[in-house]
C-alpha cells in the first residue's frame, strides 16, 4: 500500500506521478525476455593434437583433421563447446564431463580413419579366421593389447593390406611364424613377409584349441 501511495503521489514540479510516467515512458519500450536464458561463455586457446582432438577440462573433442598442430580458440558454455579457427567456427560439440574420453565426429576424420568405422572387433576376427587360425590369433592380439579394441583397428587394417600385397596364404604363414616366436605385432608380421621368412619350411602349426596364446587374449566371444 505504501508503494502504491508513493507511485500515485503527484510530482511537485512536473505533471503526473511516478505511475503515469512509467506508463507513458517506460512501458511502451519494454520487450519480452529472450526465450533462452543468457549464458556465460569461457574462452581458451588450445593446440590441436596429432589425433585432431583438443582438450577442454579433461575431455577431448575433435576438430577437422586439417587443423592438426594449429591453435584454435574454444568457446564453452555449460552445455556447448565451439571451436574457432581464424574467427570461423570449425566444430561444435555438446559438453561432456567424462574425463579422459573422446568425442569424435566422423566428418573430422581423414579418409583412412573413417574406414575404421566400417569394422567391429567381431568382423575383424571373422576376417582373420577366413585367412587362417594364426591370422585370427594375431588379429585378436592386436585388439586385446590396447586400452580399447578400436585402437587396434589400424594394425588389423594393416594386416588386410598385407594380405592383398603378399596373398592370404603368405600372410597366414607369416602369422604362424609370428605366433611361434611370440611376436604378434603388425611390424613383426610385415618384417617376416618382407624378408621372406614365411617361406621357410617346417613352420609350427596351430590348432583351434591353441588359439589363446596368452591369459589376456579374450577371444571372439568377448566382443559379442
Image: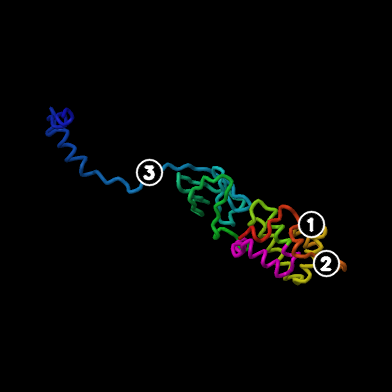
- Closer-to-camera residue (142/85): 142
Looking at the rendered structure, the secondary structure element under dot 1 is loop
Q: Quadrant of residue 110?
A: bottom right
- On screen, residue 23 versus residue 129, left or right, reads left
Of mark 1 and mark 2, the one earlier in the sequence is 1
Q: CA distance from mark 1 to mark 2?
A: 14 Å
Q: Which mark is residue 198?
A: 2
How many marks are shown on the rendered structure?
Answer: 3
- Closer-to-camera residue (29/56): 56
Cβ–Cβ under 8 Å for marks 3 and 1: no
Q: Which mark is residue 38?
A: 3
> How many other residues sit within 10 Å of disc 2, few (<14), some (14-19) or many (≥20)?
many
Check disc 1 and report the residue beneath it: 183
Looking at the rendered structure, the secondary structure element under dot 3 is loop
Q: Which residues are magenta?
A: 113-136
Look at the image and say whether residue 125 sits in the magenta stretch.
Answer: yes
Look at the image and say whether residue 137 sits in the magenta stretch.
Answer: no
Q: CA distance from mark 2 to mark 3?
A: 67 Å
- Closer-to-camera residue (110/164): 164
Camera-near label (2 vs 3) is 2
Camera-near label (3 vs 1) is 1
Of mark 2 and mark 3, the one earlier in the sequence is 3
Q: Position of residue 80 (x, y in %)?
A: 46, 48
- Closer-to-camera residue (90/54): 54
> How many other residues sit within 10 Å of disc 3, few (<14), some (14-19) or many (≥20)?
few
Amino acid at each position: 500500500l505504501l508503494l502504491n501511495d508513493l507511485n500515485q503521489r503527484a510530482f511537485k514540479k512536473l505533471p503526473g506521478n511516478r505511475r503515469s510516467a512509467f506508463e507513458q515512458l517506460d512501458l511502451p519500450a519494454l520487450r519480452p525476455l529472450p526465450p533462452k536464458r543468457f549464458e556465460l561463455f569461457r574462452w581458451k586457446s588450445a593446440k590441436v593434437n596429432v589425433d585432431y582432438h583438443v582438450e577442454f577440462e579433461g575431455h577431448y573433442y575433435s576438430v577437422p583433421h586439417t587443423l592438426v598442430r594449429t591453435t584454435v580458440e574454444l568457446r564453452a558454455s555449460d552445455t556447448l563447446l565451439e571451436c574457432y579457427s581464424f574467427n570461423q567456427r570449425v566444430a561444435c560439440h555438446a559438453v561432456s564431463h567424462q574425463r579422459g574420453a573422446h568425442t569424435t565426429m566422423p566428418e573430422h576424420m581423414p579418409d583412412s580413419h573413417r574406414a575404421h568405422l566400417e569394422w567391429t572387433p567381431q568382423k575383424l576376427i571373422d576376417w582373420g579366421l577366413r585367412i587362417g587360425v594364426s591370422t585370427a590369433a594375431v588379429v585378436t592380439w592386436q585388439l586385446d593389447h590396447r586400452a580399447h579394441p578400436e585402437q587396434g583397428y589400424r594394425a588389423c587394417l594393416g594386416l588386410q593390406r598385407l594380405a592383398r600385397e603378399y596373398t592370404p596364404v603368405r600372410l597366414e604363414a607369416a602369422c604362424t611364424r609370428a605366433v611361434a616366436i611370440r611376436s604378434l605385432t603388425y611390424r613383426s608380421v610385415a618384417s617376416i613377409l618382407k624378408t621372406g621368412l614365411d617361406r621357410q619350411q617346417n613352420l609350427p602349426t596351430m590348432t583351434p584349441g591353441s588359439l589363446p596364446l596368452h591369459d589376456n587374449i579374450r577371444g571372439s566371444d568377448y566382443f559379442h
